[in-house]
Image (tube, grey):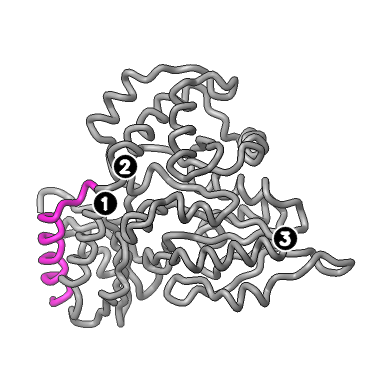
C-alpha cells in the first residue's frame, strides 16, 4: 500500500476544511480573563447540547475528568470507578495524585455497570470510613469495546446517588456515539449526572479540546481547578472555533463510523487464531482477541499500511472515524485476511 489506513484511534483525525476556515476567522480574546467570545460560544453550545447550565473548555478529556473529580470531592473522600475506567487506568493516577481520593472499583459486565455491586459499595462517612462521595461512569466505555450504558441504568444509578448523597460524573468522551447509536439525545444521558465531560478531539474530529458541563456553580468552581491544573488558555478561540463547527456538523455522521466498525468486525471475524465478538460492536470500536501474541500482528499490519494498537498481549483495538471511509474498511479487511492467513 502507498498510504495508511489509521485505525489506532479516533484521536488521529484531521480538522475539516470548515474547521480550518473557522480557525482563521475566529474572533479572539483572552479566555483566562474571560473575554474570548468564541470560547463563550462553544461553552454555551456544549451546555445547551447536554441540557446543562454551563460548560468549561479544557485542553483534554483527562483534564476534564480530573477537574470534575477534584471539584466534586475533598481529599480523603471515596470515589467509585469501574475496574477498566479510563479515568482510573489511563490518566496517570490523577484521582489519587490530583484529588487525593480513595478509589474503589466495581465491575461492568459487557460495559454495563453492576448496579447491585455499586449499591453494596456505598459507605457513609463515619469516624472510621471516608464516605463515598462520587460515582464515575464512562459512556461509551473505551476498554470494554465502546459499549453503551443504557439510559435506564443511568437513571437507576443517579437515583441511587441522590438517595445516598453521592455526586455522579460521566466521562462521556464518546457520549455522542452513544446518543447516535441509541437515538437518544445526549441531554437525556446528561440529565442523569451532576457533571459530564465529552471530547471534541475524538469522533467529532477537532484537533484539541474537551468540554466539562454542569451547573453554573459547579463550572465556576471547576474553572478555578482548571487554573490550578495549568489548563488556562489565552486566545483559545482558535481551537474553540473547531468545536463550534463540530457540534453543528459532526455529530450525526458518527453513524457512518458505527456502520464501518460493524462491517470491519464482520469482515475479520473467523480469521485463524483470532476472535471478534461481532454482536458486541455497538459504536466505533472493534476488539480482536488473538490466541498468540498480538504485537507481531500489529507490526505486520503496519507494514502493509493498516495501523492499529495491541492494547494487551492478546488483544488488538481498531477504531473507526471520519478519516476512514467505507472503501478503506474493505481494503483493511483484505489486508487483515492476507496478514493473518500467512
Mark 1 and mark 3 lie on one chain; the one further toward the N terminus is 3
Q: Which residue is mark 2?
A: 205
Image: magenta residue range: 322-342
Dots 1 and 3: beta carbons under 8 Å? Answer: no
State the predominant SS element of the stretch in magenta: helix
Residue depicted at 43% across the width and 46% down the height: 199
Image location of residue 156, percent across then percent down: 56, 68
Q: CA distance from mark 1 to mark 2?
A: 8 Å
Task: Answer with left or right where residue 26 lies relative to residue 215.
Answer: left
* Above or below 113: residue 15: above
For image coordinates 45% across by 47% down, the residue present is 198
Residue at 31% in and 42% down: 205
Q: Nearer the viewer, mark 3 or mark 2?
A: 3
Q: Which residue is mark 1?
A: 321
Residue that carries the numbered disc 3 in the rendered image: 165
Label 3: which secondary element: loop
Tag 2 or tag 3, which sits nearer the N-term? 3
Alpha-carbon span between mark 3 and mark 2: 37 Å
Q: Can you say which quadrant of the picture contains the C terminus?
A: bottom left
**Relative to residue 339, is residue 61 drawn left or right?**
right
Residue, x 59% and y 62% (percent of image)? 158
Residue 58 visible: yes
Within 10 Å of the Cα at label 2, are there few (<14), some (14-19), or many (20+) other Cα atoms? many
Of residues 10 and 263, which is closer to you in this image? 263
Amino acid at each position: 500500500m502507498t498510504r495508511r489506513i489509521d485505525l489506532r484511534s479516533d484521536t488521529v483525525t484531521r480538522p475539516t476544511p470548515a474547521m480550518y476556515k473557522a480557525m482563521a476567522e475566529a474572533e479572539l480574546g483572552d479566555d483566562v480573563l474571560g473575554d474570548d467570545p468564541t470560547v463563550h460560544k462553544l461553552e454555551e453550545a456544549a451546555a445547551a447540547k447536554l441540557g446543562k447550565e454551563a460548560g468549561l473548555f479544557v485542553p483534554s478529556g483527562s483534564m476534564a475528568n480530573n477537574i470534575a473529580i477534584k471539584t466534586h470531592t475533598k481529599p480523603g473522600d471515596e470515589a467509585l470507578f469501574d475496574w477498566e475506567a479510563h479515568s482510573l487506568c489511563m490518566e496517570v493516577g490523577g484521582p489519587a495524585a490530583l484529588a487525593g481520593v480513595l478509589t474503589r472499583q466495581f465491575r461492568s459486565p459487557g460495559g454495563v455497570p453492576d448496579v447491585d455491586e455499586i449499591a453494596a459499595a456505598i459507605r457513609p462517612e463515619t469516624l472510621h470510613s471516608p464516605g463515598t462521595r462520587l460515582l464515575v461512569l464512562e459512556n461509551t466505555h473505551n476498554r470494554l469495546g465502546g459499549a453503551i450504558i443504557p439510559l435506564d441504568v443511568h437513571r437507576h444509578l443517579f437515583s441511587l446517588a441522590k438517595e445516598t448523597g453521592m455526586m455522579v460524573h460521566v466521562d462521556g468522551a464518546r457520549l455522542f456515539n452513544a446518543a447516535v447509536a441509541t437515538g437518544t439525545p445526549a441531554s437525556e444521558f446528561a440529565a442523569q449526572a451532576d457533571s459530564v465531560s465529552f471530547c471534541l478531539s475524538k469522533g467529532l474530529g477537532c484537533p484539541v479540546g474537551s468540554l466539562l458541563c454542569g451547573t453554573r456553580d459547579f463550572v465556576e468552581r471547576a474553572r478555578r481547578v482548571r487554573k490550578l491544573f495549568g489548563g488556562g488558555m489565552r486566545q483559545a478561540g482558535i481551537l474553540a472555533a473547531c468545536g463550534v463547527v463540530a457540534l453543528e456538523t459532526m455529530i450525526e455522521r458518527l453513524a457512518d463510523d458505527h456502520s464501518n466498525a460493524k462491517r470491519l468486525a464482520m469482515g475479520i471475524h473467523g480469521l485463524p487464531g483470532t476472535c471478534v465478538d461481532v454482536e458486541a460492536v455497538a459504536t466505533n470500536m472493534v476488539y480482536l482477541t488473538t490466541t498468540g501474541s498480538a504485537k507481531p500482528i500489529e507490526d505486520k499490519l503496519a507494514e502493509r499500511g493498516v495501523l492499529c494498537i495491541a492494547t494487551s498481549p492478546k488483544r488488538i483495538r481498531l477504531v473507526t472515524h471520519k478519516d476512514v471511509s467505507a472503501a478503506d474498511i474493505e481494503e483493511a479487511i483484505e489486508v487483515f485476511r492476507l496478514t493473518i492467513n500467512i
